[in-house]
């Protein structure tokens, strides 16, 4: 929570602020909330605000997921949303002087509401705390800058550079010149990240036309790492729009170009601050057992790592995304990359999640799988070499319906997220699946309407 002194001090230092944007993050990672007039800002920051509990059980179109059981037949009661410390900040990409604060939901008795993804991750971290272990976590987020003008025939295209429109066949990986083309956008993103205490580090040009990546620094608080990823998405989208562009974290906006991922780097330190993943000569047993856990539970977790219909277009061979539940030593084609180039920074990089995924849920499943791997002394098998796939390694699920079905029956998901949340998430995804099943696509019209 935020105390009254902090709230008043913030408003005193920002006398122009007219409105407070207060929001939660739903199961799809979408911010949903209210605008609060300045006169009520202190009250909301200190005491909280009521919101319908069903805000966490919406499909990607923002409709109640009826089968989730939070709205229909319940009277749609409220939960109490309290301000998350460290998230009160200015929103300088809007014309109107605005502040923001992230919220987390609680029951009337003060217990954390089970459907809040932030609370799901909190419960996983409490398991680490009981073992006196602390995950050190960072994320890398890829995204596309796109032209804001779209149509049914031209739904996505790169923005103009100074020299004109991009040739879509070009990749220009790590091009400094193309960073300079959008210097104003990236400069303002960096400025606002500093203002909001989002620890942005490197910015780089990625593979697709108009595709970029921003890396976040490691922090010894996985909950804060997820907050940082959510806030970075808001900043990138907001600043892009201010500059006459759009930004998308859609996993595969172009069918023939690279997809966008959210890579998660993490290590674990003990109560003395020692990285338990460092062995005497290479990775420790704890690191290898963690890898074993990640691989053992990866198949039944794909619905979290690839949450949308479009997500599965990214999980395709030769699209710079893992397609097998594999691991390797400093191997970017593996789902789990073990990094030992710097002994103190020995860590795991999990490379499966799309940029369209919910950071809280992704971190919850990754950390729970690593923890269970250590407890069960799981063995990862041998590493892959290059892009070779061992014959006993199964490909990751590439069918959305099958992934949701597997998740809905998963005992691991019940442990990691709680059975109530597992069922709620599956209900939201099934409603989205139903919507896609009744939509006729332009490809079908193109192929069939006059021919068959």
Image (cartoon, rainbow, N blue to C red):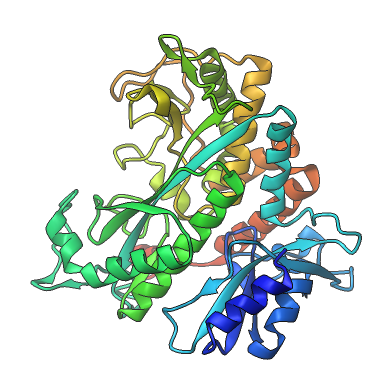
Instruction: Decide which of 412, 6 is in the foreground and name it.
Output: 6
Residue 162 or residue 447, whichever sits in front: 162
Quarter where residue 181 is shown: bottom left
Image position, residue 41 (x, y; %): 68, 82
Quadrant for the N terminus in the image:
bottom right
**In the image, residue 42 above or below residue 215:** below
Residue found at x 26% / y 52%: 204
Q: Which quadrant is home to the C terminus? A: bottom left
Q: Is residue 51 left or right of residue 225?
A: right
Residue under the image location 64 percent in, 29 percent down: 133
Asked whether, in this view, residue 328 is left or right of residue 415, the answer is left
* Along the line of sight, the residue nearer the viewer: 224 or 318: 224
Task: Judge whether residue 428 can be spotted in this image.
Answer: yes
Is 434 positioned to the left or the right of 205 in the image? right
* Identity of the residue drawn at 67% across and 54% down: 117
As drawn, which residue projects farthest toward the left? 163
Visible in this render: residue 62?
no
Q: Quadrant of residue 7?
A: bottom right
Looking at this view, name the residue that lies furthest to the top.
281
Residue at the spot 69% in from the left edge and 90% down from the top edge: 39
Q: Residue 136: percent from the left, percent from the top?
A: 53, 37
> Horizontal and vertical percent for residue 23?
63, 71
In this view, the residue in front, 386 or 39, is 39
Q: Is residue 193 above or below residue 45?
A: above
Whole-percent x, y for residue 422 in the image: 73, 46
């Amino acid at each position: 929570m935020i105390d009254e002194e902090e709230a008043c001090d913030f408003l005193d230092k920002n006398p122009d602020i007219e409105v407070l944007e207060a929001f939660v993050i739903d199961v799809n990672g979408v911010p949903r909330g209210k605008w609060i007039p300045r006169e009520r800002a202190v009250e909301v920051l200190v005491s909280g605000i009521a919101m319908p509990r069903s805000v966490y059980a919406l499909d990607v179109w923002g409709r109640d997921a009826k089968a989730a059981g939070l709205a229909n037949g319940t009277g749609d009661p409220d939960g109490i949303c309290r301000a998350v410390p460290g998230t009160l900040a200015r929103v300088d990409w809007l014309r109107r002087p605005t502040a923001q604060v992230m919220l987390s939901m609680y029951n009337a008795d003060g217990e954390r509401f089970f459907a809040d993804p932030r609370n799901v991750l909190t419960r996983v971290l409490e398991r680490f705390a009981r073992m006196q272990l602390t995950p050190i976590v960072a994320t890398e987020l890829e995204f596309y800058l796109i032209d804001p003008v779209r149509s049914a025939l031209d739904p996505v295209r790169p923005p103009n550079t100074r020299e004109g429109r991009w040739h879509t066949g070009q990749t220009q990986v790590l091009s400094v010149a193309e960073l300079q083309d959008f210097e104003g956008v990236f400069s303002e993103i960096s400025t606002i990240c500093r203002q909001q205490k989002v620890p942005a580090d490197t910015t780089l040009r990625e593979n697709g036309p108009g595709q970029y990546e921003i890396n976040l620094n490691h922090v010894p608080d996985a909950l804060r790492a997820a907050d940082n990823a959510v806030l970075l998405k808001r900043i990138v989208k907001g600043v892009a729009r201010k500059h006459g562009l759009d930004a998308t974290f859609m996993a595969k906006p172009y069918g023939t170009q690279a997809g966008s991922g959210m890579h998660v780097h993490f290590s674990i330190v003990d109560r003395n601050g020692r990285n338990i993943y460092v062995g005497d000569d290479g990775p420790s047993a704890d690191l290898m057992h963690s890898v074993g856990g990640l691989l053992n539970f990866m198949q039944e977790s794909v619905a979290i790592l690839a949450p949308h219909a479009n997500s599965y277009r990214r999980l395709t061979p030769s699209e710079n995304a893992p397609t097998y539940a594999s691991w390797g030593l400093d191997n970017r084609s593996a789902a789990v990359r073990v990094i030992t180039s710097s002994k103190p920074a020995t860590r795991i990089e999990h490379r499966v999640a799309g940029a369209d995924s919910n950071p809280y849920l992704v971190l919850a499943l990754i950390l729970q799988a690593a923890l269970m791997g250590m407890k069960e002394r799981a063995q990862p098998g041998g590493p892959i070499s290059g892009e070779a796939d061992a014959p006993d390694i199964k490909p990751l699920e590439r069918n959305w319906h099958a992934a949701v079905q597997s998740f809905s029956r998963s005992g691991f998901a019940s442990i990691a997220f709680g059975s109530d949340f597992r069922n709620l998430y599956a209900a939201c995804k099934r409603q989205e699946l139903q919507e896609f099943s009744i939509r006729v696509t332009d490809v079908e019209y193109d192929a069939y309407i006059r021919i068959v």
